[in-house]
């Protein structure tokens, strides 16, 4: 088996026209490998990078120089691995989408000890963002109708960021407890939200049924 490229401690290898990812599993004390569904080296490296996120150890991305005050980016993979097992595929895809769209540009280099103030600034940043529903991203094209993020969406994004801190603290990767959630104006509780469908009152339903039985009945 020939090694083509290294992805961290993982290796992209080829053998008889097939591509594999190989790595050393220290707990099992043996080398493991998995066949990749790739036909080119480029595809193999891309798939290997994605699989490495699943198989690496949760604290593997934390620098030895960070100690127990790692950055948001260093403890993200531990949170991602936890959510991979718990979330549906759609919810997990949304989480990864938000990683590149919101978290990586603003929070990735922030240390846990400075996360409280950074989170307040993050909320302000999210409140100023505008996006295009037509294109599905933050940078609207010319002539697009732009929208602000809904406060409930902002609360969900911020809540996930806090979960990253909480997971790092409870797992022993950080000795900094998560900060409290910043105030987000306009957030509504589920029971106060405008229903998406129409509501048919019981009395109205009774009148409709009587009209079906007796067409002469006045509603």
Image (cartoon, rainbow, N blue to C red):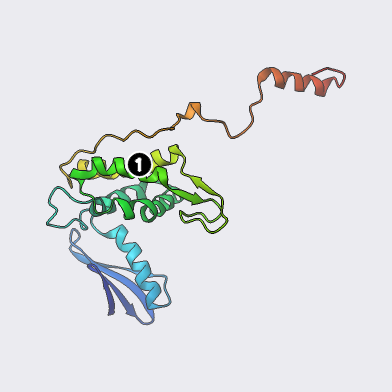
Looking at the image, residue 191 sits to the left or right of residue 183; the answer is right
Q: Residue at x 36, y 82 (%)?
A: 16
Q: Residue furthest front?
A: 143
> Within 10 Å of the Cα at label 1, are there few (<14), some (14-19), or many (20+) other Cα atoms?
many
Question: Could you say which is closer to the camera, residue 184 or residue 19?
Answer: 184
Question: Could you say which is closer to the camera, residue 122 or residue 156?
Answer: 122
| Quadrant in the rendering for residue 65 | bottom left
Q: Residue at x 37, y 73 (%)?
A: 44
Q: Residue furthest right?
A: 216
Q: Residue at x 83, y 17 (%)?
A: 218
Quadrant occupied by the N terminus: bottom left
SS class, disc 1:
helix
| Quadrant in the rendering for residue 198 | top right
Instruction: Count the marks.
Output: 1
Up the image or down, 137 lies above or below 198; here it is below
Q: Position of residue 126 (x, y in %)?
A: 39, 45
Q: Position of residue 203 (x, y in %)?
A: 69, 17
| Quadrant in the rendering for residue 174 | top left
Up the image or down, 9 lies above or below 89; here it is below
Question: Could you say which is closer to the camera, residue 82 or residue 191?
Answer: 191
Quadrant occupied by the C terminus: top right
The answer, for residue 191, to whether it is visible in the render is yes
The answer, for residue 160, to whether it is visible in the render is no
Q: Position of residue 51 (x, y in %)?
A: 33, 63
Q: Residue at x 20, y 38 (%)?
A: 177
Q: Position of residue 22 (x, y in %)?
A: 27, 70
Looking at the image, residue 38 sits to the left or right of residue 20; the answer is right
Residue that badge 1 annotates: 123
């Amino acid at each position: 088996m020939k090694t083509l490229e290294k992805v961290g401690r993982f290796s992209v290898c080829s053998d008889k026209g097939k591509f594999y990812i190989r790595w050393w599993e220290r707990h099992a004390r043996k080398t493991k490998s998995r066949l990749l569904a790739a036909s080119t080296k480029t595809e193999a490296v891309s798939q290997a990078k994605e699989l490495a996120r699943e198989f690496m150890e949760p604290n593997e991305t934390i620098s030895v120089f960070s100690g127990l005050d790692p950055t948001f980016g260093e403890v993200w993979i531990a949170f991602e691995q936890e959510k991979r097992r718990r979330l549906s595929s759609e919810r997990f895809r949304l989480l990864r989408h938000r990683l590149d769209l919101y978290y990586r540009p603003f929070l990735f280099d922030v240390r846990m000890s400075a996360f409280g103030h950074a989170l307040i600034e993050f909320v302000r940043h999210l409140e100023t963002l505008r996006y295009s529903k037509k294109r599905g991203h933050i940078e609207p094209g010319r002539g697009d109708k732009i929208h602000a993020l809904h406060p409930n969406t902002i609360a969900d994004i911020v809540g996930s960021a806090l979960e990253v801190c909480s997971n790092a603290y409870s797992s022993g990767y950080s000795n900094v407890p998560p900060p409290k959630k910043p105030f987000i104006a306009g957030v509504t509780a589920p029971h106060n939200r405008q229903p998406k469908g129409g509501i048919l009152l019981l009395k109205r339903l009774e009148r409709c049924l009587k009209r079906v039985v007796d067409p002469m009945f006045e509603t």
